[in-house]
Image (cartoon, rainbow, N blue to C red):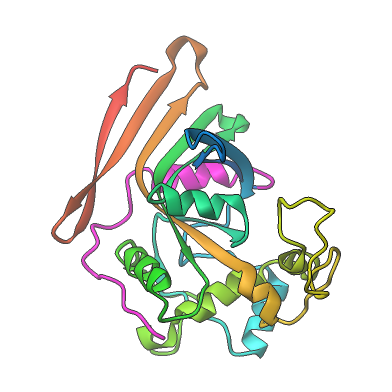
């Protein structure tokens, strides 16, 4: 299945370049991910936070050389013709956070602390989950929403197709690239017993067990559980503590427009 991004996007967000510069200073770009769940007994809303690996902006996945080679060998490498300000990470569809997205219209906030520049980045928005079969309502709805945040890249890239045709790019290849970027042992984690269940509950399926290696990019069990989470960011809070005597803080808010979005920037008291 192919797609075409909206070419009328307003261009890069004003916070994009500095954010990427700061994130590049992290040895491993992990982020705290907050969602809203429900207490199983009282049904009251409860916050939940965990640490996830930041996989870059959607459409711009930085590939490991081994992953890129395998994708090329299997003709699963998308041309790199899109960019965005939509954060991405991966998850197991059986995990609690996916239920939280479904019950809160995708409400999510992530936080990065970059000590080298003494800056905190908080990004809020809507989480969209992809990786299921094409044609399913939830999958198609998520893809359509993500499409609104994609825009065509400017200039050439080594992963671009010969003619730059959008028809060479597919959702399935993009999700496969995220899967390929994991090591075989990490791919195997998607064949673990159901996360969060008591270990006294032995899975009925003997294929679900710990410590498996998955070299196959299309392993049916692992891919059934594998998902990519894409965050359409609508608010960014940047707190600069590099000068204790003169801390500064900015808020960037996405404002929908007829041809995409524009960003409103306001400096706040820290």
Residue 30 lies, in percent from the top left, at: 63, 45
Left/right placement of residue 22 relative to residue 74 reads left
Q: Could you tell me which quadrant the C terminus lies in?
A: top left
Q: Residue at x 67, y 89 (%)?
A: 73
Residue 146 versus residue 217 in the image, above or below: above
Residue 98 lies, in percent from the top left, at: 53, 55
Q: Residue at x 47, y 25 (%)?
A: 240
Residue 230 lies, in percent from the top left, at: 46, 58
Magenta segment, prevailing SS (helix, strand or loop): loop
Write the start and end of the magenta stretch as one range.
1-28
Residue 180 versus residue 192 in the image, above or below: below
Q: Quadrant of residue 61?
A: bottom right
Q: Residue at x 41, y 51 (%)?
A: 106
Look at the image and tell me whether residue 250 can be seen: yes
Q: Residue furthest top?
A: 245
Q: Could you tell me which quadrant the N terminus lies in?
A: bottom left
Left/right placement of residue 199 relative to residue 72 reads right
Magenta stretch containing residue 13, yes or no?
yes
Look at the image and tell me whether residue 159 can be seen: no
Magenta stretch containing residue 2, yes or no?
yes
Left/right placement of residue 21 relative to residue 72 reads left
Residue 76 lies, in percent from the top left, at: 58, 85
Q: Residue furthest left?
A: 258
Residue 103 versus residue 49 in the image, above or below: below
């Amino acid at each position: 299945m192919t797609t075409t991004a909206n070419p009328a996007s307003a261009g890069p967000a004003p916070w994009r370049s500095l954010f990427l510069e700061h994130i590049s200073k992290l040895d491993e770009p992990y982020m705290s991910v907050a969602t809203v769940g429900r207490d199983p007994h009282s049904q009251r809303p409860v916050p939940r936070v965990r640490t996830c690996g930041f996989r870059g902006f959607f459409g711009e996945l930085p590939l490991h050389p081994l992953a890129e080679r395998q994708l090329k060998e299997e003709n699963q490498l998308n041309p790199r013709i899109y960019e965005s300000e939509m954060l991405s990470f991966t998850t197991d569809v059986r995990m609690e956070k996916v239920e939280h997205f479904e019950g809160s219209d995708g409400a999510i906030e992530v936080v990065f602390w970059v000590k080298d520049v003494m800056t905190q980045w908080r990004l809020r928005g809507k989480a969209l989950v992809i990786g299921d079969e094409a044609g399913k309502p939830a999958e198609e709805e998520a893809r359509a929403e993500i499409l609104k945040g994609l825009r065509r890249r400017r200039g050439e890239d080594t992963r671009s197709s010969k003619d730059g045709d959008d028809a060479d790019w597919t959702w399935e290849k993009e999700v496969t690239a995220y899967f390929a970027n994991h090591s075989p042992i990490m791919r195997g984690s998607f064949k673990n017993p159901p996360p969060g269940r008591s270990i006294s509950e032995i899975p009925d399926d003997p294929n679900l067990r710990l410590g498996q290696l998955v070299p196959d990019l299309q392993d049916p069990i692992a891919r059934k559980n594998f998902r990519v989470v894409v965050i359409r960011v609508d608010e960014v809070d940047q707190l600069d503590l590099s000068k204790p005597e003169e801390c500064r803080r900015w808020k960037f808010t996405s404002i929908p427009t007829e041809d995409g979005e524009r960003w409103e920037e306001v400096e706040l008291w820290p």
